Image (tube, rainbow, N blue to C red):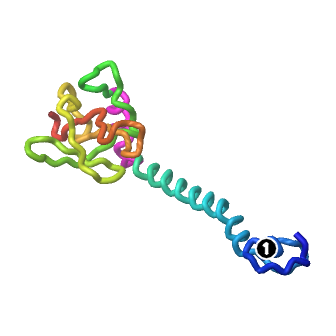
Amino acid sequence: MSSLCKCMRPACLAARADEPGSGRVSGARTLESLRWPLASLASAAGLIFAVSTAAAQHQHPPQDEPLHEKFYSTWYMPDNPSKSCCNKADCYPTEIKYVGGAIYARRREDGKYIPIPPQKVERNRDNPDGRSHLCAPPPNSLHAPDTVFCFSLGGGT
């Protein structure tokens, strides 16, 4: 577009602002050019936070690592004994509560108490430390909401 155009329409002003030597900067153009880099930066920061939080949540107390590793690596689903409960990333000690006779276990990632299906309760082996243990995917996984792989009631059921 030529600088000879004296049109005051926003499109003309924006086009003239981008001409070399105009000394003007298009506000709309500048904001638009920053939108994607800022969005990418915000997404990266969020991802780093989520990964670091998840990593911190998946750490077991150092003194319990070998005990939990052995227990979790040899734990199979009570209702499907040929299938592993998962691994130490999905399994962890948990708090429980009873509601109307049903067991609810506290999911680590969001603190929500999720119902434990009776068929997922381990009845054939004691847990390693007397605490209740839950194997469940995080709430934002591809599994159905409130999925439970395995559960072991504290106190050596």
Q: Residue at x 19, y 41 (%)?
A: 154
The spot of residue 132 in percent (x, y) is 22, 42
Horizontal placement of 124 versus 20: left or right? left
Horizontal placement of 122 versus 17: left or right? left
- Asked where in the image residue 101 lies, by quadrant, the reply is top left
Count the labels in the image. 1
Q: Nearer the viewer, residue 70 or 82?
A: 82
The spot of residue 103 in percent (x, y) is 16, 42
The spot of residue 97 in percent (x, y) is 16, 48
Kind of residue at disc 1 = Cys
- Asked where in the image residue 100 lies, by quadrant, the reply is top left
Q: Residue furthest top?
A: 82
Q: Nearer the viewer, residue 130 or 29?
A: 29
The secondary structure type at the circle numbered 1 is helix
- The segment highlighted magenta reads 59-74
Q: Residue at x 68, y 66 (%)?
A: 32
For mark 1, what is the residue? 12
Q: Is 20 rendered above or below residue 143?
A: below
Q: Residue furthest left?
A: 100
> From where the camera sits, is residue 5 visible?
yes
Q: Residue at x 28, y 40 (%)?
A: 134
Q: Nearer the viewer, residue 127 or 58?
A: 58
